Image (cartoon, rainbow, N blue to C red):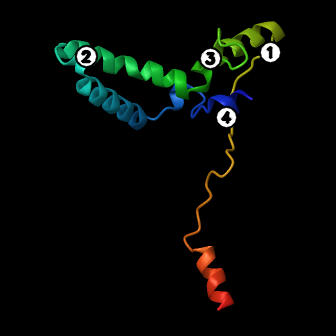
Amino acid sequence: MHIAAAEPRFVSRDEVPASVLDKEREIAKAQAKNDPKNANKPDQVIYNIVEGRPNKFYGESVLVDQPFVKDPSKTVGELVTEKTAKTGERITVRRFTRYKMGEGLERRGDDFGNEVASLLS
């Protein structure tokens, strides 16, 4: 249920490719420089804003860093740790699969109305 609602892309921070983090930093840097509130701020402040962006990205895209849907006061990682302590068994999330209706389907390029009209004439 959590995966369907929160749409994580990765299980843990270790799985996030460096290229994805670099792209996030580029986006954050462009946003920070284009923001009028940051016009007079020194480069070090903008650098700190950009470096803070990956933590937000992790919270949105990494399963174990996301707030748990049923109890947002704890993350999925904290929930797993809690359940491990309670059961005494080691619990890990190795992978997940999320299906989204219509994802991966390509739209047809032909025009069904014209096809029917040509058959009727």
CA–CA distance in space, label 4 to label 2: 41 Å
What kind of residue is marked 4?
Arg
Disc 4 crowd, CA 10 A, few/some/many (<14, 14-19, 20+): few
Disc 3 crowd, CA 10 A, few/some/many (<14, 14-19, 20+): many
Say if mark 1 contacts mark 2, CB within 8 Å: no
- The percent coordinates of residue 10 (x first, y second) are 57, 32
Q: Is residue 55 above or below residue 1?
A: above
Give the labeled residue for mark 4.
95
Mark 1 or mark 3: whose residue is earlier in sequence: 3
Q: Residue at x 77, y 12 (%)?
A: 83
Q: Is residue 48 above or below residue 96?
A: above
Give the labeled residue for mark 1.
89
CA–CA distance in space, label 4 to label 3: 18 Å
Judge by depth and name the residue closer to the eye, 78 or 103: 103
- Mark 4 element type: loop
- Label 1 or label 3, whichever lies nearer to me, is 3
- Mark 1 element type: loop
Q: Residue at x 63, y 83 (%)?
A: 117
CA–CA distance in space, label 1 to label 3: 23 Å
CA–CA distance in space, label 1 to label 2: 50 Å
Say if mark 1 contacts mark 4, CB within 8 Å: no
Say if mark 4 contacts mark 3, CB within 8 Å: no
What kind of residue is marked 2?
Lys
Mark 4 or mark 2: whose residue is earlier in sequence: 2
| View extreme (right): residue | 87
- Label 1 or label 4, whichever lies nearer to me, is 4
Judge by depth and name the residue closer to the eye, 8 or 115: 115
What kind of residue is marked 3?
Pro
Q: Is residue 78 above or below residue 111?
A: above
Give the labeled residue for mark 3.
67
